Image (cartoon, rainbow, N blue to C red):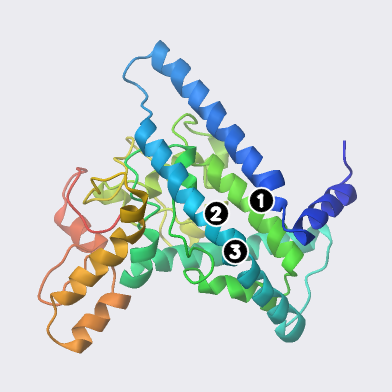
Amino acid sequence: MKTPHELLTFLADMAHDGSIFFRLVLPLYVGMIILEFGMTAWRMRQKPGAYRWSHRDGWTNVAVSSMNMTYDVVIGILLPFGLYYLLYTQYRLFTLPSSVWGWVAAFLIHDLIYYVDHRISHRTGLFWAFHSVHHSSQEYNVTVAARGFFLNGTLTMPLYYLMPILGMSPFMILVVNVVASLFGIFNHTRLVKRMGWLEYVLCTPSNHRVHHGTDAKYLDRNYGQVFIIWDYLFGSYQREEEEPTYGLTTQLQTNNPFAIQWAGIRWLWQQMKTAHRLSDKLRYLWMPPGWRHDGPGQTAEEIRARTTQPQNVALTTS
């Protein structure tokens, strides 16, 4: 059994030689996929029809994540952490200590920044064009966790660069991000129902299933990655009642990983083309998905206002 100091040293060694993803995160992720698949197959035999697993969708998620992994190895890790190092050494406002409270503060700072960045991704057309890749699966399992736009973390989460300015060293950022990412993988499952009092503190699988729902009451809710407290504080919390319908409200009818990568950008371009004035075209970049320049649209707020009871509707955002 490693002591906390030995564990941090072990993580630091993997961080320095760039192998932390391949030696730690990837094996754990593959293990989660195998475990969930096995449990799902067993439950499908016990309760036929109660669970589902689309092999085509799962392999699509693996293909999308492999494309992202290739990019990360070349650019997606080196560039952000190079910038983290520059900002930390030259522009940090203070230094978080390597004490228990320093690490607690680091986790809270990371999760709050994630919440704000994630909320922006759902509330602005440009960032939704990137983030919608993650929501495009009509299934909900741990393979969906790695389904994302290939520039995630480099250009699509700009507020992450506040972390080194707020005193988080690149090593601290790496450790916190790895732990938070592993938790984010865990909460992409249908197998875990509710987790008692933890539902009020953590972004459990139940809380995160809401986030992936296309049902009107579930739209733009539960943005947290590890903690759900931010959603309580900022009015974006929604309890899971019935199981959501997953995916996009206008579903992508393809398993082509390249088509999925660019579907959001293509959607945004089509929206902008409908406007004649340049000012309206540009507004599609920062207005919420579903906003229309020529009258009432299909933003989450407009849909909820028109919906008198829970039902699945054709929306623009999820």
- Is 133 on the left or on the right of 17, as rendered? left
> Element under label 2?
helix
Mark sitting earlier along the chain (2/3): 2
Q: From the viewer's perspective, is the residue at label 3 or at label 1 nearer?
A: 3
Q: Is residue 140 visible?
A: no
Q: Which of 55 and 296 is in front in this view?
A: 55
Q: How far apart are marks 2 and 3 (CA)?
A: 9 Å
Location of the C terminus by quadrant is bottom left
Name the quadrant of the N terminus. Answer: top right
Amino acid at the residue labelled 3: Val
**What amino acid is found at the position of numbered circle 1 in the picture?**
Phe
**SS for tag 3?**
helix
Mark carried by residue 21: 1
Residue located 71% across and 52% down the image? 20
The amino acid at mark 2 is Met
Image coordinates for residue 229, horizontal then vertical, percent: 54, 55
Task: Say if mark 3 contacts mark 1, CB within 8 Å.
Answer: no
Compare residues 240 and 68 and report the one nearer the observer.
Answer: 68
Q: Report, in whole angstroms, how far the alpha carbon at label 3 lies from the one at label 1.
A: 13 Å
Mark 1 element type: helix
**Image-quadrant location for residue 47:** top left
| Front: mark 1 or 2 | 2
The structure residue drawn at horizontal position 83% and vertical position 50%, both measured from the top left corner, is 10
Residue for point 33% across, 65% down: 129
Q: Name the residue under label 3.
A: 74
180 lies above or below 174: above
CB under 8 Å between callouts 1 and 2? yes
Q: Residues within 10 Å of mark 1 (few under 14, many from 20)?
A: some
Q: Name the residue under label 2.
A: 69
- Image coordinates of residue 144 in percent, x first then y, are 44, 43
